[in-house]
Amino acid sequence: MPIIDCVAVTKRYANGQLALDAVDLAIDKGEIFALLGPNGAGKTTLIGVICGTVSMTSGAVRVAGADIQRDFRAARYRIGLVPQEIALDIFATVRGTVSFSRRLFGRPPDPAFLERLLRDLSLWEKRDSRIIELSGGMKRRVMIAKALAHEPEVLFLDEPTAGVDVNLRRDMWALVRRLREGGVTVILTTHYIEEAEEMADRVGVIDNGRILLIEDKAQLMRKL
Ligand code: ADP
Ligand code: ADP
């Protein structure tokens, strides 16, 4: 059973814009999957629909078997979402931000897990700093820590390296690999083909709300 299963997912926004047009997509546990497409292709909308933050017009999405529309809580619990925009309480501390996020999902505190997570993201030294004191790169790391705080099985990264410097980009790639070693399924969006190639096991090319092709890395590289 795929961990993410989208069947005929269609999204038409209130203004009439068709953002997703009957998308079928199955993603297996432990995969790193990249959604590659130009601006406006429908990548963010697709992530939103799978995570239940954007209502779909028709179709169905299952996350580990749980229907996102009928069983939102069970499905959402398995997902960590890192949106494009940084959205953090600037007066909260790093540790407080991450702990709060874990608590929202009803998971008991686990100091050892929290320490490992913050160390993995090079945030441990900053654990008692307030968000307002952090650099942009650090804030992005906090967004990731926040999304992983409840130990989800699937992590969504929306344009994780857009506007990010080379060092942080490398760190992101390393992080994605480590997550995979830990058994986490990673789905990311990008409009850089090199990034899709570098990070993903499979790449889905999306444009105008349609998945045009899905290929594994070897197939994609042969075509380039
Ligand atoms: P939903 O159908 O998921 O409730 P809406 O269609 O109501 O979403 O859109 C949410 C808001 O985003 C609306 O206020 C809409 O005007 C605004 N919006 C419109 N066009 C765009 C766009 N191209 N990108 C981002 N937001 C947009
Ligand atoms: P991408 O993430 O690939 O850049 P999006 O999913 O953000 O693409 O957008 C897909 C299409 O839907 C675009 O045409 C965009 O303008 C439109 N769109 C996105 N959000 C909204 C919204 N809230 N209301 C209306 N149209 C939207």
Image (cartoon, rainbow, N blue to C red):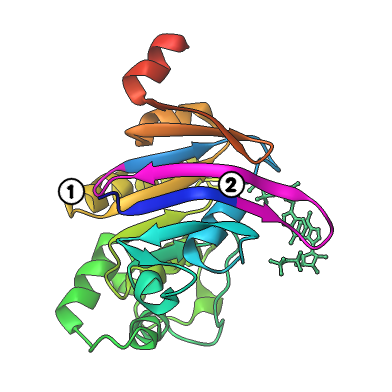
Q: Please state which of residues 59 and 137 is positioned toward the viewer in this rendering.
A: 59
Position of residue 133 in the picture relative to residue 125 (left or right): right
Residue 151: give x, y in percent of width and height.
26, 70
- The residue depicted at 54 percent of the width and 77 percent of the height is 88
Badge 2 amino acid: Lys
Q: Is residue 136 left or right of residue 209?
A: left
Q: Which residue is mark 1?
A: 181
**Residue bounds of the magenta highlight:** 10-31
Q: Nearer the viewer, residue 23 or 40?
A: 23
Q: Amino acid at mark 1?
A: Glu
Q: Secondary structure at mark 2?
A: helix
- Answer left or right for 61 relative to 152: right
Q: Position of residue 163 (x, y in %)?
A: 60, 47
In this view, which residue lies farthest toward the left? 112
Q: Residues within 10 Å of mark 2 (few under 14, many from 20)?
A: many
Asked whether mark 2 lies closer than 8 Å to ligand 2, one says yes
Is 192 drawn above or below residue 40 in the view shown?
above
Which residue is located at x 37 percent, y 79 percent? Answer: 98
Tell me the mark number nearer the camera, choosing from 1 and 2: 2
Judge from the rendering whether residue 31 lies leftward or rightward of residue 58; answer left or right.
Answer: left
Q: Which residue has dot 2 on it?
A: 43
Residue lying farthest right? 15
Percent coordinates x, y for residue 64 in the rendering = 30, 61
Where is residue 36? Give x, y as percent. Answer: 53, 35
Ligand 1 occupies quarter: bottom right
Q: Mark yes or no: residue 183 visible.
A: yes
From this view, report whether residue 176 is shown above or below residue 37.
Answer: below
Q: Which mark is residue 116?
A: none
Mark 1 / mark 2, whichever is N-terminal: 2
Q: Residue at coordinates 74% horizontally, 48% vertically from top-left?
A: 18
Q: Is residue 20 magenta?
A: yes
